[in-house]
Amino acid sequence: MSILEIIIITFVKILFIITAMLLTVSYSVYFERRISAWIQTRLGPNRVGWEGILQPFADVFKLLLKEDIVPEKSNKPLHTLAPFIALFVAFSTYAVIPMGPEVTIFGYKVNLVVADVNIGILYVLALTSLGVYGITFAGWSSGSKYSLLGGVRASAQMISYEVSMGFSIAGVVMMASSLSPVAIVNSQYGWMWNAIVQPIGFITFVISAFAETNRLPFDLPEAEPELVGGYHTEYSSMKFASFFLAEYANMIIASAMIVTLYLGGWQVPYIDKLGLGETLTTLIQVGAFFAKIGALIFFFIWVRWSIPRFRYDQLMNIGWKVMFPLSLLNVVWVAVVLMIFN
Amino acid sequence: MIEQYIPIFLVIATAAVFGAAVVFSSKLFGPQRPNDIKISPYESGKKPVGNTSERISVKYYLVAMLFIIFDIEVIYVYPWAVEFKSLYAQYGIFAFTPMLIFLIVLELGFVYVYMKGGLKWD
């Protein structure tokens, strides 16, 4: 393929993904509100459109028309840079997550992933580390005590859980012998899902993902009863919406990463043995990928509305004294499993 | 080889444009009527007390330092993890023991930090 063809194909994929991403983000907000209402026997948003289905659009337009207040004590360049970093990170991590097998469209062999790079996992880790800056800058530059506390808490929490996250991923890398997400999905053929082969790594990764995305029970950075809004207390209008979007986008990316690394990605066990024809198989596989992500998003929301928040010392203790040794154990476990079965 | 990375650069550029558009859009569409009360820091409606340049507990810095140490160890594990299967085919158990020793040393360092009270939060 020539460079021009690559650029055109990539742009089509990016357009598709940004649209899909914006829709899933706004609808996961809607579903969060509906599911939380359902869990607490309330009604939830049900006025705008049928059963409130247009609520996300109403919210976005409202925020778009609000005044963008910049507090006088803030560091203005960083105050603007912070939501930009948060959004930028959330929307560029998507590039390496494979959504389906290689398909042939109009005679082109197209991989259903924006960028099939051999260092995909490192790319994701690098960008999630960058995400810490968005939140820390937001907290530090706002010139408000609540924001500062939220930002400091967030940075300590996110870097603590990043260590165990890194070690958990090492187990997956060993199974696939590659850092490319495409190869990792391919290595989980049949029932060889990493969640089954390395349950410890799966659990540590899922818990770290909750902590990295600042979701309850790890939402200390924005604990409402103590910190008002945490790091985004002083943000309004679309800058606030940026953090909100980024938070939900990160939740979706975390779900997609859990699916890719541990739940077989787009694989449906033994579907190729059924002889359904190539197009149908591909469609089912892509559908399975999104169904798995949907189930995980539901799980994220379910946990948020069921489990109370940790205390800060408990949070740090779990991160360092439980998750870190467990994720080291996982590396040893995977090595032993590989040595026994190879 | 470099072709692999063209999509990454395109995604990064698109994400940057998108992020900037969202962040600056409310400057375009929203009203701009700041006043003294509105732009003062939020403190539940009261007059703000003190400022934010106070000292932060040293524990947070300790966590940051520990993070740097242990996160670098993760990077040492990755190349080995990628090559583990082929190393095992070539060297057998000796593909695993060096990394086991490395992890034990790492764990010893962790136990030392633990014993010294470096992870204590009260």
Image: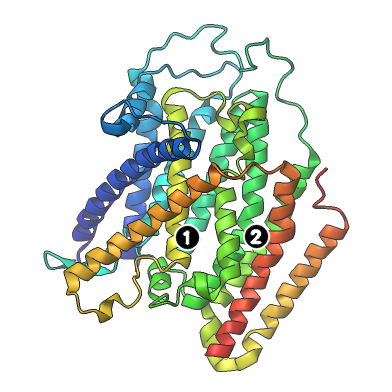
Residue type, label 1 = Ile
Q: Is residue A302 visible?
A: yes
Q: Residue at x 64, y 34 (%)?
A: A150
Q: Residue at x 43, y 71 (%)?
A: A184
Residue A306 position in % (x across, y down): 57, 44
Inter-mark Cα distance, 2 to 1: 20 Å
Quarter holding the N terminus of chain A? bottom left
Left or right of residue A330, residue A78 in this image: left
Left or right of residue B65, residue A168 in this image: left
Q: Residue at x 55, y 23 (%)?
A: A234
Label 1, secondary structure: give it.
Answer: helix
Left or right of residue A342, residue A309 in this image: right
Q: Which mark is residue B71?
A: 2
* Residue B80, quarter of picture: bottom right
Residue A238 vs A277, above or below: the answer is: above
**2 or 1: mark nearer the eye:** 1
Residue A278 position in % (x across, y down): 18, 73
Residue A228 vs A186, above or below: the answer is: above
Residue A266 position in % (x across, y down): 34, 66
Q: Quick one: A115 or A262, which is closer to the camera? A: A262
Residue type, label 2 = Asp
Judged from this view, the residue extending furthest toward the right is: B116
Query: Mark 2 falls within which chain?
Result: B
Residue under numbered circle 1: A258
* Residue A319, quarter of picture: bottom right
